[in-house]
Image (tube, rainbow, N blue to C red):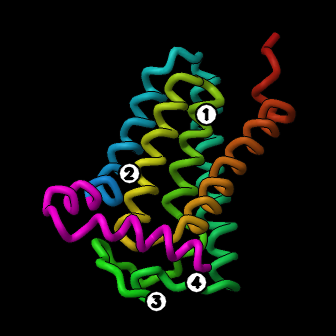
Amino acid sequence: MQFDFAIVHTLNELTGTYLWFDNLVVFCAEILPWFTLVAFLIWLAHSTEVHRQRFRALFIAISALVIARLGVIESIRFFYERPRPFITHELNPLLTMTDWSFPSGHASVFSALAMTVFLFDRTWGVRFFIVTAIIVLARIISGVHYLTDVLAGLMLGSGAAWLLYTLVRKFAPFNRRRR
């Protein structure tokens, strides 16, 4: 816990000096995620993959989001209530939220998208992971997440997407060729 707070405290100290920096952090934490969702849909629409592969990528992404964010994370938060860093420590919060911080829902959602893209298109997948890293770093800087919140969310989202990809490739009926 001390290590977690030290990281949040150090990064949060960067805020409050320059308005442009604070606005950039808020943009990356709150607005960039929406652009990332749009970018995913554009990637999907313009993907060089055949129609079946696009459907598969969309199915995996949506399923991973639902399982990780609405299933696993909400279950964890039901049993483990970890307050947000700005609530329990003296920080300069750039965002305020009232729900629990562990694990990070944003990290799970965007790592699930990034992993899905990565599994179908490595080049674009790396780009999505970089954007995901920017989003979650901004959420730590803004004081709404600890590092362990983000790491847990990243593992849940990426793991759900990878597991679904593996299962879909092995068992999905639309894997078989038509005769």
Q: Name the residue under label 2.
A: 33
Give the distance between the C-alpha atoms of the residues marked 4 and 3, in whole angstroms: 10 Å
* Mark toward the start of the polypeptide (4 vs 3): 4
Residue flagged by tag 4: what amino acid is it? Arg
Q: Nearer the viewer, residue 141 or 46?
A: 141
Q: In which quarter of the image is the N terminus?
A: bottom right
Answer whether labels 2 and 1 touch (C-beta < 8 Å).
no
Give the distance between the C-alpha atoms of the residues marked 2 and 1, in whole angstroms: 19 Å
* Mark toward the start of the polypeptide (3 vs 2): 2
Label 2: element kind: helix
Q: Name the residue under label 3.
A: 88
Q: Is residue 154 above or below residue 46?
A: below
Q: Is residue 134 above or below residue 141?
A: above
Give the distance between the C-alpha atoms of the residues marked 3 and 2, in whole angstroms: 26 Å
Q: Residue at x 51, y 49 (%)?
A: 110
Point out the frontmost of discs 4 and 3. 3
Residue flagged by tag 3: what amino acid is it? Thr
- Say if the magenta span includes residue 155: no
Give the distance between the C-alpha atoms of the residues marked 1 and 3, in whole angstroms: 40 Å
Q: Name the residue under label 1.
A: 57
Q: Which of 53 and 79 is in front in this view?
A: 79
Q: In the image, residue 148 lies at what x, y percent?
A: 60, 67
Label 3: element kind: helix
Give the extent of the magenta segment: 1-26
